[in-house]
Amino acid sequence: MDARTRWGRFRRSEAASGLVLISPTALYALLLLIVPLAAIVGYSFLTDGYLVIEWVPTLANYIEAWTEPLYQLVMARSLFVSATVTLVTVCLAFPVAYYVSFHVAPNRKSLWLFLITIPFWTSYLIRVFLWKVILGYNGVVNSTLMGLGITDEPVTFILYNVNAVVITLAHAYAPFAILPIFVALEKIDRSLIEAGQDLGESRLLTFWRVTLPLAMPGVVAAVLIVFIPTIGDYVTPQLVGGPEGRMIANAIQLQYLRLDNYPLGSALAVTAMLIVTAVSLIFVFLNRRFLRVKQ
Amino acid sequence: MSNGTGFRIYAILYLIFLYAPILLLPIFAFNASTIIAFPLSGFTTDWFAELLTIPALHQSLKYSLIIALITAVVSTCLGIFAARAATRYSFPGKGGIIGLIMLPLVLPEIIVAVSLLVVLLGIGVTLSFWTVILGHVLICTPFTIAILNSAFMSLDGALEEAAYDLGENKWSTFRLITFPLIMPGIISSLLISFTISLDEFIIAFFLSSTEPTLPVYIWSQLRFPTKIPAIMALGTILVLLSITLLIIAEYFRRKGIKRTGGKDTGGFL
């Protein structure tokens, strides 16, 4: 009897209403995200037979993914590209977020944010392809450089290599970096900055000692939100990267759709996820001082 | 603000950088040459006319529109449940559950795509536009929740309490009070998820087999230099369509915030 009344009370409680309400969405994410993620972890330990998967547990896929020089190179390059893109994107985005938060009239802020986010929502494939046009042999950059007489022949170090991938990705993920930084800057109590200046700090020192530390949670969020998805980008390396610009997503796609080697593809995917998670956790740990700041 | 001008110039240059590819699109769409490069050779609307003559394109557009429509409705419904639960109730494991639902926002899309592919093929599901919808709903739901959260948060709880006091039950209160007030948020959420689904490539690339979506069709054409001008024309139309949908979405988002008496905190996300 006691159990039943307790259950009855629980059923009418706020906690139960909340859980019931969120359950369709949570169940969907569980079935179509968590179960599949668990499945690729499982697959990564199976043996690849010819056209079939053999249910023999093995570590061979991980040994191949971690020791094969080709995969080591691709993985290292992916990390390098993502880290560079993240650094470039966040550094270029910070002043824009700062400008919109501190110098734009409040009623114009959402217009600025809207303008910044629009390019992000428009045909990703075609935007990446256009970078190929901009950076290409007869492209916009080269015709400008030659038109101005800066170079005599087209420069080729900006297409089909890592540089092109970095430029294109830095463009594609720009809005991702601006928004979290903007949100963090908006939360800063303006009187703290005035206090800093009243106490005799210069503008630059006030920024360094007050504004930046308070904006760090946004910067950390921006870093993660750019770093994590860029490492798995497929379209950009495929279109503008050329052979020496291939990244881990291209290797994963090759294993799954071309070579039909699901176990090795899964091991590569799991490895990439583990590395991304590890790097992100280390980054958050290094910045823990700023994240504890009460706003 | 003397040093505000420096920032302003920088911000405007940054916007030009952001818009550069999109601004080039119409230039090449109306360029008479089949080669996508400078110098330009003349004005033509042939590439737009060519679009009308490609049946494969029309077929993929049809699939994309159906997928985007169903994705928008399903992910907005899932978003309403989750956003309502997140803003109105506290329950055990709330942070974890919401974190799980929002995870696709940061997860590389290729991971979502391959993991779904493995499971769907593993349980014997034939790939079709339905499997693309499953993936699209997963990645659109976090965006719908972000939009609907702000719609629910700016909602005054007293209005609902008043309805209860006046004898309405849970469902009729939702239908008569809550729903009309968050309607602009719902429209905004529908439009955003429609736009995301219409534009999404990776998941559609992995999960559609014989029924390519529009981005998958575009991808297949990018290999053929002679097809590129028509793709530029198509891109011009798609960009105009996306911008139109986004402006409407933004209009409803702002209207919603005004209607519920909240303060505008900025764009989507």
Image (cartoon, coloured by chain):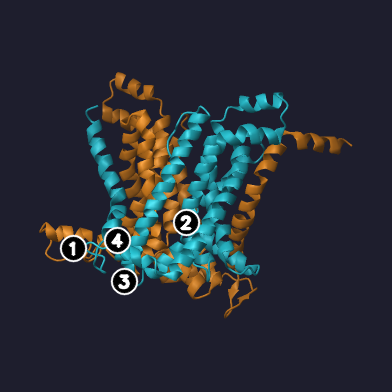
Measure the alpha-carbon separation of dots 4 and 2.
21 Å
Q: Secondary structure at mark 4?
A: helix
Q: Which mark is residue B225?
A: 3
Of callouts 3 and 4, which one flags the residue occurring earlier in the amino acid sequence?
Answer: 4
Q: Quick one: quadrant of the N terminus of chain B?
A: top left
Residue A202 left/right relative to B209: left
Q: Secondary structure at mark 2?
A: helix
Measure the alpha-carbon separation of dots 1 and 2.
32 Å
The tint chain A carries is orange
| Residue denoted by label 1 | B39
Q: Quadrant of residue B160?
A: top right
Q: Amino acid at mark 1?
A: Pro
Q: Using the image as rendered, state which of residue A285 and residue B181 is in the foreground.
A: B181
The chain assigned the colour cyan in the figure is B
Using the rendered image of the protein, determine whether residue B81 is visible from the camera's viewpoint: yes
Of callouts 1 and 4, which one flags the residue occurring earlier in the amino acid sequence?
Answer: 4
| Residue denoted by label 2 | B198
Residue sitting at 37 percent across and 21 percent down? A191
